[in-house]
Image (spheres, rainbow, N blue to C red):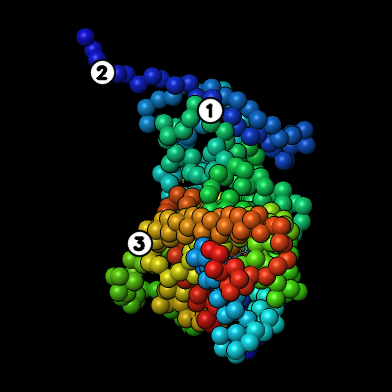
């Protein structure tokens, strides 16, 4: 009997959760690198150089950044393809889901719909962001990023992306815990409450961190608008601060 | 002077979604009834009052009126629940009742959960599988079971197949072939049973796809609305882990 088992449904389910987990860990880590600007332009420059491998190889390889973005892009594509299986597949399914969600007034069910919608939005928002990073990996830095955000008006994209990605990641990690978590029947409800509370706090924290960073980039970008395009050089600009 | 506040008697407005699919004249419609609330009144009592005093044609199911038979499941103000275990004092003045969605409608509030449950049981083979059951001597004492294990089994056996978890589940509402929490819970119950000789690979063949455990999207409506408070989330997560490890 053993050899006739079709293991693909199990693998796909695991892969969906695994890709989601990796993406959440990525975005939560990414936030700290991105918000290095809060510690100043030099700190962010250091992080930029680190990702280009300059501290390791002595000279920058922006291709490393492109490669990292490509991996995240592939991960998102995989995750989205797997998630697509769960979308309502017909108008009838959509209708029944809609009616169900409307009448049942159940938070976790509603959160799933939020996850589907934010996931759908992420497909566009995250893709644009990642494509820009992939195509212009060398165009990242205290001034380069700020100019893109302010003079290039990318702040509109990033403000949406920030909110959407953290809501999606928060719900996702909560669902992951409930989907796989080995809680005993007696403590499952307790853990569910604790995890929910923790996730609320984490999402709130990242939204604050992200907003603070974005506002900082916008401020730097606005100040630097007349010289947009010029790169940050600690030897020239660092002393001025 | 009497200062003890007397609870105001309420008049309940009970709206019932009525339809008889076997009557070609019938179209789905809401019908409103007024019922004087009494102390400790359940929806079971209210519906019987309506049927006795206002409309003998109203159809709904009851057997045990004690939350044991599972026949009185219905949608109460948008959520599934057992009518016999729902006190009107926990509900607002206006109560809307509808049949459980996802099951064949018999008429009004009566649905054929039995047919669905039987189909599920046959598909998931929810009975003890063992060699030589035919030759089993029923007069011989059964082998004893560890009390803790028996307790665990009993806990999962408490499901009354009321269908509330199917009505509470977005997945089951979208996908008609989804086994639902009731089915997945029963698989874990037989997996736990030492008398059942099936292996995890055997169970995988029954629930190892998107109409089984991998279809569940962990919306937890089942867990939150099971009137018997079965540990459905824990059981489904457990089954998912076991099936992935198979
Ligand atoms: C194009 C982008 C994306 C789409 C279309 C998408 C869509 C979805 C959908 C529909 C679900 C629910 C699936 C289910 O209930 O089984 C989901 C789950 C999840 N998503 Fe996304 N998502 C995207 C990007 C992301 C990103 C960037 C992250 C990380 C920050 C993420 C993290 C998660 C997690 C952890 C889950 C839970 C996984 C699970 O239930 O097994 N997703 N996603
Ligand atoms: S699991 Fe709970 S809600 Fe589902 S049929 Fe059994 S008793 Fe009813
Ligand atoms: S956890 Fe959600 S999707 Fe899974 S069976 Fe329960 S209600 Fe349905
Ligand atoms: S009448 Fe038996 S459960 Fe309600």
Q: Is residue A158 above or below residue A110?
A: below
Distance from the alpha carbon under mark 2 to that under mark 3? 41 Å
Q: Position of residue A106 (x, y in %)?
A: 53, 48
Where on the image, by quarter, is ligand 1?
Answer: bottom right
- Using the image as rendered, state which of residue A100 and residue A73 is in the foreground: A73
Q: Do the CB atoms of the residues marked 3 and 1 lie less than 8 Å apart? A: no
Please tell me which residue is depicted at 40% across the width and 58% down the height of the picture. Answer: A194
Which mark, by number, is residue B4? Answer: 2
Q: Which residue is tagged 3?
A: A186
Between A113 and B31, the one lying in front of the other is A113
Q: Position of residue A115 (x, y in %)?
A: 62, 57
Label 2 lies in ligand 4 vicinity (Cβ under 8 Å): no
Q: What SS does tag 1 mark?
A: strand
Q: Pointer 3: residues within 10 angstroms few (<14), some, or many (20+)?
A: few
Query: Which residue carries the number 1 mark?
Result: B94
B71 vs B192, nearest the viewer? B192
Question: Is residue B27 left or right of A191 when viewed as pictured?
Answer: right
């Amino acid at each position: 009997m053993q050899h006739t088992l079709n293991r693909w449904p199990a693998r796909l389910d695991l892969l969906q959760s695994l890709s989601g987990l990796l993406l959440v860990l990525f975005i939560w880590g990414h936030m700290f690198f991105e918000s290095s600007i809060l510690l100043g332009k030099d700190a962010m420059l250091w992080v930029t150089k680190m990702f280009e491998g300059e501290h390791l190889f002595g000279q920058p390889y922006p291709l490393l950044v492109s490669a990292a973005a490509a991996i995240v892009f592939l991960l998102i594509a995989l995750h989205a393809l797997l998630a697509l299986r769960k979308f309502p597949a017909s108008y009838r399914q959509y209708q029944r889901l809609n009616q169900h969600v409307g009448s049942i007034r159940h938070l976790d069910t509603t959160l799933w719909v939020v996850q589907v919608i934010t996931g759908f939005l992420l497909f566009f928002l995250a893709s644009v962001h990642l494509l820009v990073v992939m195509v212009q990996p060398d165009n990242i830095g205290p001034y380069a990023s700020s100019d893109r955000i302010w003079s290039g008006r990318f702040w509109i994209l990033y403000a949406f992306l920030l909110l959407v990605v953290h809501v999606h990641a928060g719900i996702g990690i909560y669902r992951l815990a409930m989907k796989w978590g080995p809680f005993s029947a007696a403590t499952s409800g307790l853990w569910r409450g604790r995890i929910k509370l923790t996730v609320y706090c984490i999402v709130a924290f990242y939204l604050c961190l992200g907003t603070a960073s974005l506002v900082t980039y916008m401020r730097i970008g606005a100040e630097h608008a007349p010289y947009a395009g010029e790169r940050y050089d600690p030897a020239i600009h660092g002393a001025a601060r | 002077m009497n200062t003890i506040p007397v609870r105001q008697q309420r008049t309940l407005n009970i709206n019932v979604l009525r339809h008889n699919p076997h009557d070609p004249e019938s179209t789905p419609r809401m019908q409103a009834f007024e019922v004087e609330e009494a102390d400790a009144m359940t929806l079971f009592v209210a519906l019987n009052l309506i049927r006795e005093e206002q409309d003998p044609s109203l159809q709904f199911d009851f057997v045990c009126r004690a939350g044991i038979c599972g026949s009185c499941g219905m949608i109460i103000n948008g959520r599934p629940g057992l009518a016999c275990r729902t006190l009107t004092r926990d509900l607002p003045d206006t109560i809307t009742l509808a049949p459980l969605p996802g099951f064949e409608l018999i008429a009004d509030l009566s649905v054929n959960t039995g047919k669905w449950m039987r189909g599920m049981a046959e598909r998931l083979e929810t009975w003890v599988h063992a060699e030589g059951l035919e030759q089993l001597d029923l007069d011989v004492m059964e082998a004893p079971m560890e009390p803790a294990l028996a307790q665990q089994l009993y806990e999962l056996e408490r499901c009354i197949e009321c269908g509330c978890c199917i009505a509470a589940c977005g997945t089951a509402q979208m996908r008609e072939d989804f086994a639902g929490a009731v089915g997945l819970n029963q698989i874990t119950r037989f997996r736990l049973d030492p008398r059942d000789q099936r292996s995890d690979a055997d169970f995988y063949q029954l629930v190892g796809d998107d109409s089984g455990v991998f279809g569940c999207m962990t919306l937890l409506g089942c867990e939150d609305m099971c009137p018997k408070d079965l540990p459905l989330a824990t059981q489904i997560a457990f089954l998912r882990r076991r099936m992935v490890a198979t």
